[in-house]
Structure formats: C-alpha cells, structure tokens
Amino acid sequence: MAHVEGFQAAANVSGASPPSRSVLLGYNQSASYVEAKLQEVADGLDLIQRQHFLTPVWADQSQHAMTLGDHGIKVTLVPYQDFKPLRFSGSSPAGGVNATAKVFDNTACARADFAPASGKVAVISDTPVCQSLYARVMAAERAGAVGVVVYRNGTEPLLPNQRVSDPGWPTNISAPFPAIPVVGIAQIFRTAVVDD
C-alpha cells in the first residue's frame, strides 16, 4: 500500500486535476520514486541506472477558439465547456481552419468514405460501428479533410474525451499521429454544425 501511495504522490506533484500520470507530468516523478526506493536497498552500491528513451509527447499549449456559423449567424463556443481539442490531434495552421462542414454517419470508415470531406471539416460521432476513432480520423485526413469535429452520439452532455492515437500505441510507436486538428464538441451543438 505504501508504494501505491508513493505513486499517487508522484502523480499529485503535477497539480493537475485529476492527478496526472502522463509522460510530461507524472512519468519522471514515478521513475524518481522507484529509483529512490531501489537505492534504499542497494547497500551503497552503484547498481541503479536509469535508461532514457524517446517517446512522442502531446501537450495542449494553445489558446483555443471555435465559431460555428452559417447564413450570417455565428455562435462562439467556450473552450473546455462547449469544445476541446482531443489528445494527440494535430495543430491548426496559422490563422486557424475556416471551412465548411461535412457530416458523416457511423458507417464512414475508409478513406474513400471520407472523399467528400476533401478541403472540409469532417463531422463524426464518437461511436462508430466499424473502427477506432483514430482510424476514422486518419482516413478523413488522407481523404483531404482539414479538420475533424467529434460529437457524442446520444444525450450524453459531456465532451468527447478520446485520445486520437493508434490503439496499439505505445507499443506501435511508428504509427503516425494526425496532422489535422481534431476537436470534441458537446452533443447539443451537433445540430449547429451545418452540412454543406
């Protein structure tokens, strides 16, 4: 139990809520904890070595803005209340993304399915019937989409919270991350995303 509490204390160091165990905020603290515990039983011998390795790191470092609009009517959404970037998504280009939306049903999975999204923002639900969110985002990106908006399918009021990374990551570290921005929106705004 003491070690569980020690790892929890390492996660708490980040000050994040909930406590973080991420590479940026929790991993190094956890590794330091293990190293210190091993040194306690090493009897002064220099047996403990830390092996360093590289890993992809995603950090939310931007000020976010999102506006939905059509026919002169615009709705400005509140970051982390109405929308948020999904972890491991790409960044918006300088000046942001200004494009029409194309709504896809749950059966759109392959690159060919997302062909109508070329030059547009693909709008999809978070409950596909075919593949992972990552696979659908990558298919939309390869079809030429400039962004992806993900909404909850149903009446769930919370924002989508998936990671847009290969399901095999981190063991499959060669899998690319999306280059286009992917944001989750509250389900209530789904009807405000107007198809072309």
Image: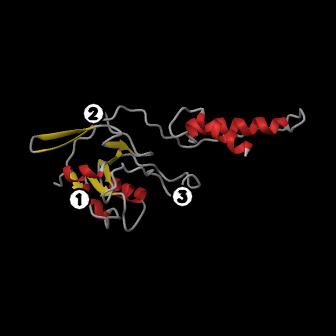
Q: Position of residue 123 (x, y in %)?
A: 27, 54
Q: Position of residue 34 (x, y in %)?
A: 74, 40
Residue lying furthest left = 71
What amino acid is at disc 1? Pro
Asked which secondary structure carries label 3, the reply is: loop
Give the labeled residue for mark 3: 168
Residue lying furthest front = 1
Specify whether 68 is left or right of 9. Answer: left
What amino acid is at disc 3? Gly
Give the labeled residue for mark 1: 116
- The answer to whether residue 119 shows anywhere in this view is no
- Of residue 170 and residue 13, the one placed in the foreground of this image is 13
Q: Are marks 1 and 2 in contact (CB under 8 Å)?
A: no
Measuring 45% from the left and 50% from the top, which residue is drawn there? 163
Q: Is residue 151 above or below residue 69?
A: below
Q: Position of residue 47 (x, y in %)?
A: 84, 38
Q: Position of residue 106 (x, y in %)?
A: 31, 65
Mark earlier in primary sequence (1, 3): 1
Measuring 18% from the left and 55% from the top, which residue is drawn there? 195
Give the labeled residue for mark 2: 95
Whole-Å distance between the Cαs marked 2 and 3? Answer: 33 Å
